[in-house]
Amino acid sequence: MSAVEEVSHQDGANQVSDVVVRFAGDSGDGMQLTGSNFTEATAIYGNDLATFPDFPAEIRAPAGATFGVSAFQIYFGSEDVSTAGDDVDVLVAMNPAALITNLKDVLVGGLLIIDSDAFTDKNLARAGYSSNPIEDGSLDAYRVIPIAVTKQVLESVKPFGLSHKFAVRCKNMWTLGLVMWLFDRDRSITTGSLKQKFANKPEIADANIAALNAGHAYAETAELPTGVEVYRVPRAEAAPGLYRNITGSESLAYGLIAGGQLADLPITFASYPITPASSLLHTLSGQKQFNVVTFQAEDEIAAVCAAIGASFSGSLGITSSSGPGISLKAEAISLASATELPLIVVNTQRGGPSTGLPTKTEQSDLNQSLFGRHGDSMLPVISCSTSVDCFDVAIEAVRIATQFMTPVILLSDGYMANASEPWLLPDINDYEPFPAKFETNPEGFTPANRDPATLARVWAKPGTPGLEHRIGGIEKDFDSGDISYDADNHQRMTDLRKDKIEGIANYIPEQEVSQGSPKGKLAVVGWGSTYGSIHQAVKRCRLEDLDVSHIHVRYMNPLPRNLGELLAGYDKVLIPEMNTGQFINIIRAKYLIDAKPLNKVSGQPFKIREVETAIRSLLES
Amino acid sequence: MNAPVQKLTAKDYASDQEVRWCPGCGDYAILKTIQKLMPELDVQKENQVFVSGIGCSSRFPYYMDTYGFHTIHGRAPSFATGVKLSNPELDVWVVTGDGDGLSIGGNHMIHVLRRNVDLQILLFNNEIYGLTKGQYSPTSKVGTKSPSTPDGSVDMPLRPCVFALGAGAKFVARTIDTEAKHLAPVLGRAHDHKGASFVEIYQNCPVYNDGIFDQIKDKKNAADTRLVLEHGKPLTFGIEDRKGLRMNAKTLLLEIVTIGEDGVTIDDLVVHDETNKVLAQMLAGLKLPEFPEPIGVLYCESTAPSYTDDVYQQRIVVRETRGPADINDLLRGGHTWTVS
């Protein structure tokens, strides 16, 4: 345990402040389901938590293969938790492949719960073991609990008469029961959700529940090694109110719906399946009771074009994809920029280039968002920093798109899209509405009329008598909106589009310092899902009185108007990014600051320690 | 819009923009016919929307005083789908060409047709790329000499109506740019059809492919080179309708026969049935010089549901089942807990 030294015996239980548990098995072993059930129970228990589902691109990789290992990590504790944790305290390994690929992350002295039945010669060889690690002493640095899980499971589900195949599938619930005992979690929510999930197959539900209970009972009664007892993780102090767990893709979907309502606009969401962005389409397509139409297009291009067509006719068009799909949409996004129509383009970033690492996370599409189009096609770009933050950022994207008549690129990533955290539920009535304005008056109307302050073009939707007009990709006359190839006019229109986007800086909040003081020795400047790691690293350093602050940027373009001045107040600036250094180039170019990079592109989020080490070495240098 | 439909004229549908097509372009004739047709349709002007891609034909919306969107190459069907999904009350027309609609935009054409989105799709087929200065197109005949095929094209052309039927289109017709008397009623039918209506318009490009349809358009030859389709009427053509098409029961192919020869009577001819897809597919494949080329409505399946209608019907059902939508309820769905 990360807090194993702090063990205190209370009511016969060990008390620890925080724990990292990782469930790992074959991609068909149900590790994600196990993890999400444990997460629910942990949230209800009252711990703060963060999760990291980490799965392969293969749907059902060959059993026992190292490339097919699927893992779910949860970090929970009694204090502010904002990452899925650095080192693993408890690893559940369902087979040798899961053990060999995850052992490097386990703390020395950590607990290994192993299904010894899966450690057959074939599986061992497949994972690359020349001898059985349970027996050869190579795990001596850990506390190993080998259990014949498969045998136990088959025994516990025998009364339900399932075939061997279905019986073995209950393994994950048996293991979950054991881990729930270990941390004193309530099984009733899992029981309930199993009944719901298998409502049409009650025998499967009953068998899974029996396995869950059997795993729990085994732990309670079996002679587990010394020191393996129930661990108590005290409840976290949290602001009072109603909570739920939420993943980034869910909160993003809900934010888009809320944004549509605040803008008083119907939403047309057009998308094409791509990992890890598809869950947004799934969530929204299940919310037809709201003013939302979803459209699964034939390709990425059709999706963005349909969204733009919807915006032309008076809805808010939204499209969503990941990097490769966004590339395909680029031409159409520039049309929306030229025709000045609202559009939201959600990019749930993944490892690239090309197909890259579809299920792994990265922040490498910032350059694409800012520059990845033909012509001078400048757009606002905003980014989410946590699963919960996706809700507010989505609302903000709707506000900017509709108030400024422009496409907005919203950056999320595979990590926060899938990761969940507790959410103190907001009340939608506390949000200020920003109703969209449609032109209705034919007097003096041209499609080129614009708001003198925001420079937003007028929105006149088909169906409005007297406002019939044409828009298109050809350059338009500044005054009439008719097509124009005039040289001076093109200069004027290009300047106008640039001024409009840059002017958005006057309508967004100034940059705040999320932790620390507004001047000092070092600012760690982050954006996107690095929030949690930077937050914890800065917090730890500040506990030791190190002079370091955390600034987290949401508005990537235009940047907050005070950002340059703010950064000038620090001796040094560190910019951690899950790419080879994209935001740092913007900061260096724009503010002429000698910012230092910290880059990682392993498909995994930053560990707190990695950021902490970089902070210390910069402060010492 | 409940206001009574005002009686407008063709002039009311002409925008103030100078038309910029080449002199003699078939697009002028189509524009005129459509501007004249518009007041005849039972649709308010503000509900008319023309969406186009890129190419000569795609400049069309600029010249109509309706709502119009000149978009990007090949994607007009996708924009139009979004327009219609967002507001099903709108009457949406897609104007495209053979390069725009069948080459760069071929994928979208397949899907807009199979989904049966309620749109009129007008494909101006001039068998050439005009706006990029004369390269051969996916409908150019084999041997077409063009800047990109100086020794003649070698690839097989695509037949737009065969393509449309193959994609599952429920309304497929063919007509001719300069023949308003044929063009207007066909477009009227396309408009009245619920679902995706696909109309191929033979359109002359006087600059890069002049006279490509002369054999069919020339009044002297027309009787022998075109097969005018009318639902319920036998498939006759030629001078005084002396020739016709008969189904050969052995080969299952259409064959040309002459009435009065070898005992052939009009009763031996195939009677055009717009609802017969097999017949439509056979007709769509007929081409010169072996056969006259059919013009008119090849296929019309009027009972098929339109995508847009079904999408909205599904929404209504969901809303009735789930009751009023509240965001606070949505957020509070699933497991929640209270910290006090």
Image (spheres, coloured by chain):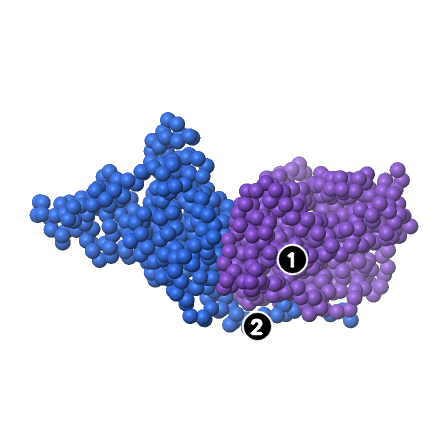
Chain colours: A purple, B blue
Along the line of sight, which residue is nearer the eye, B255 or B172? B172
In the depicted structure, whether residue A521 falls above or below residue A344: above
Q: What amino acid does circle 2 point to?
A: Pro
Quarter placement of the C terminus of chain A: top right
Residue at 72%, 61% (x, y): give it.
A422
**Disc 2 on helix, strand or loop?**
loop
Q: Position of residue A514 (x, y in %)?
A: 81, 54
Chain letter for mark 1: A
Q: Residue B226 falls in which quadrant of the image?
A: top left
Q: Which mark is residue B324?
A: 2
**Disc 1 on helix, strand or loop?**
loop
Other-residue count near label 2 (Cα within 10 Å), few / some / many at <14 / 14–19 / ≥20: few
Residue at 11%, 51% (x, y): give it.
B265
Residue at 81%, 43% (x, y): give it.
A574
As drawn, which residue projects farthest toward the top? Answer: B151
Residue bearing the label numbered 1: A451
In the depicted structure, whether residue B37 falls above or below residue A321: below
In the depicted structure, whether residue A410 falls above or below residue A355: below
Chain letter for mark 2: B
